[in-house]
Image (cartoon, grey):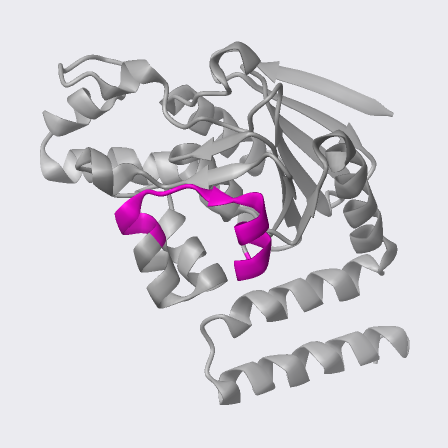
Amino acid sequence: MSTDDLETDGWVRTSREGAVLTVTLDRADQLNAQTPATWSALAAVGASLDDDVRVVVLRGEGRSFSAGLDRSMFSPEPSTNGGLGELGHLPAEEAQERIRGYQGGFRWLRSPGIVSVAAVQGHAIGAGAQLALACDLRVFADDAQLRLPEATLGLVPDLTGTSTLMELVGYSRAMEICLTGRAVTAAEAQAVGLANAVVPRAELDAAVADLVAAITAAPAAASRATAALVRSAVRNDFAAQDAAERAAQVERLHELAGGR
């Protein structure tokens, strides 16, 4: 069975097929431009996950994944839409707390128990790039381009993008991509580890489906434990990671042996 839901204000649509939840940015006429309502809708999806969801596929409707912030967000005038003008007029602590809430729409994509996969076509710019980077895995169409232009606009990437980019491509390349704001093509993305695969645009959905099928073919408990180990390896030293592997393996062995 498949269920569908539409978060009208945030242009976020979800559908569920067994253990796979698909989250679609559904604002194709605006290249899936994002607003704070989008991030609230995404955070709500993350909060609603149940234990049976193993994979979350994040995609954008139409010809682009997401072209970033909605243009209305760039107004320098204070408003009530959560845009840059409003944030610039708030006290620092209040503005930071507001952004922390926005970041919640991104961080849940690394939640324990799930693996997230971004299907990226066309533009992934700014907030769109950071949303793709927030996922565990990325499949790019051959027309995809990823950009983080915030520094060139007098801003910084603030939707979790600096840490996730650094994990993927390393210090010097992340620094260069962020400071120049240049476009990273699909071919380069695959070469530097941003994209797990690059396929013709017409084959994107099929390639993502194949990847999801491979992930869900493994037993759920072993898959989740392995994903947790890979995530912890990013920050653990060798001793801590070795200990984490030992503990996880013994837990797996005990379960296989009948719960001893």
In-front residue for pair 40/250: 40
Displayed quadrant of residue 68: top left
Displayed quadrant of residue 141: top right
Could you tell me residue 200's position as x and y percent? 72, 37
Q: Give the quarter of the figure containing the C terminus.
A: bottom right
Could you tell me residue 100's position as x and y percent? 31, 40
Residue 129 magenta-highlighted: no
Query: Number of labelled discs?
Result: 0
Q: Main secondary structure of the magenta part?
A: helix
Displayed quadrant of residue 119: top right
- Residue at the spot x=57%, y=59% of the render? 191
Q: Is 231 situated left or right of 197 in this image?
A: left
- Residue at the spot x=32%, y=16% of the render? 71
Residue lying farthest bottom? 239
Q: Is 215 situated left or right of 119 in this image?
A: right
Could you tell me residue 66's position as x and y percent? 49, 27
Asked whether residue 179 is in view, the answer is yes
What span is colored magenta in the figure?
177-193
Residue 180 magenta-highlighted: yes
- Residue at the spot x=51%, y=87% of the render? 238
Could you tell me residue 15's position as x and y percent? 72, 25
Asked whether residue 111 is in view, the answer is no
Q: Give the quarter of the figure containing the N terminus.
A: top right
Q: Is residue 205 above or below residue 160?
A: above
In-front residue for pair 140/88: 140
In-front residue for pair 50/174: 174
